Image (spheres, rainbow, N blue to C red):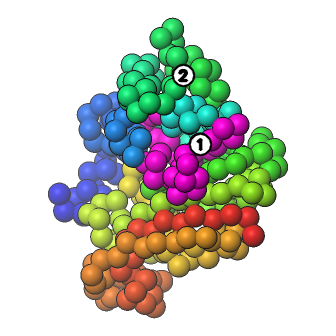
Amino acid sequence: MNWRLKIAAKVVLSRLGIPYEGWRKLGLFRLGRMDRPDYALKIFDLHILRAIPDGRLDGKTVLEIGPGDSLASAVTARAHGAAEALLVDAGAYASRDVDLYRAMAAALEARGLPPPDLSDAATLEDVLAHCSARYLTTGVDAFADMPDASVDLIWSHSVLEHIPLKQLPHLFGEMRRVLKPEGLISHNIDFQDHLAHGLNSLRFSEAAWESPTMANAGFYTNRVRAGAMHAMVREAGFEILQEDFGRWPAPPIARRDLDPAFRDLSDDELRIATSHLLARPA
């Protein structure tokens, strides 16, 4: 579907008042693929093994930002020895299907890892209790109740681009506050628009893009480019240990089609589609 039609369709659908679970079942809106055990394990490995090569989380407190459709990371973190898992999202989007988490436990057992015993779990709350996990659904505000220097590892995958523009610096500051001095953060960031995997979002003025009509229609990204995003991490008090970029061969949009606020970006910046960073407190 053309990106213009996607915007129109999603704006209309967002006004129907149907809860997220209904859209997810219809396949029209999804918050990632973390409800698939193979994918959830792949993403967990991607972040954990970059940060901790042996994959062991013994006694550690870990925090995932934006778990999306499932809390599979809680099961996986427990199987890797974590003492506590915190899962922070902007709403209660995760599946409550206990069988999904049992399937994750079975996949971990097949790998030779000791998953939590979920045989008597009847609810999502039971699953969380067995995993020593907490599901916090007030977004960035959830950090307010976390003690300073209490978390060993924070990660997110294709999430930071969705944080509202005005909340992003505060989020990085809160990550720095709650992270232990020897802790690490690992983030994969998708700078493509969530319409046609290009940069069509950069066609719009800030006033139009940040309006409630656009921001609440299920395709919002904050449009912060890679250079500025990584600079925010450093400004929040982190030292970036690793950073990698995925690039298009050429900018996917003509400069004349960009909103004036983005026309001075370099071609190299406009070629960046994704990035990963691993950082520690400076």
Q: In this view, does 226 lie to the left or right of 63?
A: left
Q: Residue furthest right?
A: 148
Left or right, 28 with reference to 89: left
Q: Earlier in the sequence, mark 1 or mark 2?
A: 1
Does 268 appear in magenta? no
Gap in angstroms between the C-alphas marked 1 and 2: 15 Å
Residue found at the very far top of the displayed protein: 120
**Residue 6 position in % (x across, y down):** 25, 56
Picture coordinates of residue 77 (x, y %)?
56, 36
Residue 227 or residue 137, whichever sits in front:
227
**Which label sits on residue 116?**
2
Name the residue located 39 percent from the left edge and 46 percent from the top edge: 42
Q: Residue at x 57, y 16 (%)?
A: 126
The image position of residue 195, as x and y in percent, is 30, 60
Q: Quick check: 212 above or below 256? A: above
The residue carrying mark 1 is 56
| Range covered by the magenta-colored residues | 43-72
Task: Specify few, some or many for label 1: CA neighbours under 10 Å numbering under 14, 14-19, or 20 or more.
Answer: some
Of the pair 70 and 218, the residue shown nearer to us? 70
Q: Which amino acid does label 1 sit on?
A: Arg
Is there a contact, CB below 8 Å, between mark 1 and mark 2?
A: no
Q: In which quarter of the image is residue 33?
A: top left
Of labels 1 and 2, the one closer to you: 1
Could you tell me if residue 131 is visible in this image? yes
Q: Which of 56 and 181 is in front in this view?
A: 56
Tag count in the figure?
2
Q: In which quarter of the image is the N terminus?
A: bottom left
Judged from the image, the secondary structure of the residue bearing numbered disc 1 is loop
